Image: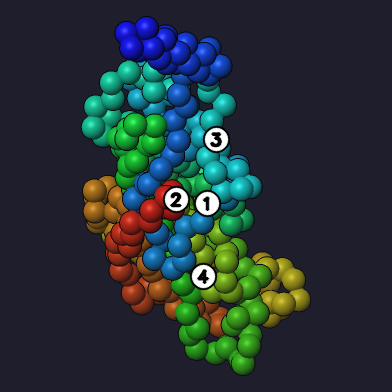
Amino acid sequence: MKYKLLFLITLLAASCSNETAENPDIGDSPLAIGEISTRTDGVTEWIWQENDQLTVSANALTAVYTRTAAGKWTSGSSTFTKETLGIVAANGISLAFGTEGLTSTQTSAATYRLADRLTGTGSLDFLTINGTVEHQYIDLVITITEGDGWSTGQFTQTLTAASLALNTSNSVSTTVAAYHPEAATFRAIIPPANLPRGTKVSLGTLTMSSGSETPYFLQGKSALITYTNNSTDGDLKGKRLNLSVKMDLMLSDISITGITIEDFTYVDIPDEFNP
């Protein structure tokens, strides 16, 4: 019986040894993006697109994760691993998306979207990064409303072809070409420090098209939009600033009829990073 027991122990030891040899160490463990709670724009849910990039930093190391067509996040970094990072404090991971600074051309959906800046922190749950990011800039939404003198359909046709250049402040001399998603709506994402402040200051210039879609007496004409803004950077950071502007046919009256400041809507979306 003693010999049989010794033989059994020897077989078990050999089996464990063989298993180790057939499954060698495959190296460091890459990290994945997990659940990131964040905010939507209050109109439609932010949808991540192929080639979007999320910058992730911790313990003096940085990796850029890219969104794939399959809806996954991949990183080309071979050094941003659990082993190289070591111990990561709770909320010790920095997360960032978008452009740092003012984007002067926002005329397309893509350039408007990337003008946004979202930052936050995350924590490491074994091999998964979970965290929270928030909008840092202002989503400026200007809606032009129909005033007096317009015939049926004329206002919409004219505004569809118009463009809006927004002024900036704080030693930035450039203007911002606004996104124009709908006939009478213009949007731009601007850092709080670059939004003009004061009483009856110039916010931007609305320019009519020189084409046939615009009444001949308005072709190439422009109108100045002024407003009053005494808010601080903290008041506007991560907010949506809605302005309603009434415009008469002869441009004799371009006036602000409403200003509201709204919060972005907070949502918790599991397994996907959806600002």
Q: Secondary structure at mark 1?
A: loop
Q: How is the image coloured?
A: rainbow
For the residue carrying disc 2, how many other residues have a C-alpha within 10 Å: few (<14), some (14-19), or many (20+)? some
Badge 1: how crowded within 10 Å, few (<14), some, or many (20+)? some
Q: CA distance from mark 4 to mark 1?
A: 23 Å
Point out residue 103 in the picture as x, y percentages from the top left corner: 51, 44
Pair 3/4: label in front? 3
Q: Is residue 155 visible?
A: yes
Q: Secondary structure at mark 3?
A: strand
What's the residue at 44%, 78% (across, down)?
246
State the separation of the CA atoms marked 3 and 2: 13 Å
Dot 3 or dot 2: first in sequence order is 3
Height in image: 198 above or below 36?
Answer: below
- Name the residue: 48% across, 85% down: 147
Specify the amino acid type for callout 2. Answer: Glu
**Residue at left offset 51%, top offset 34%:** 65
Q: Residue 199: x and y, percent?
A: 28, 60
Residue ID at (56%, 81%): 250
Q: 207 or 59, which is in the foreground?
A: 59
Q: Is residue 148 left or right of residue 257?
A: right
Instruction: Tell us which disc is closer to us: 2 or 4.
Output: 2
- The residue to which callout 4 is attached is 185
Identify residue for label 1: 48
Residue flagged by tag 1: what amino acid is it? Trp
Q: Amino acid at mark 4?
A: Thr
Image position of 14 (left or right of 216): left
Give the residue at mark 3. 74
Dot 2 and dot 1 residues touching (CB under 8 Å)? yes
Q: Residues within 10 Å of mark 4 (few under 14, many from 20)?
A: some
Give the residue at mark 2.
272
Expressed as whole percent of the image width and height from the top left, the position of residue 229 reads 29, 59
In the image, what residue type sits under mark 3?
Thr
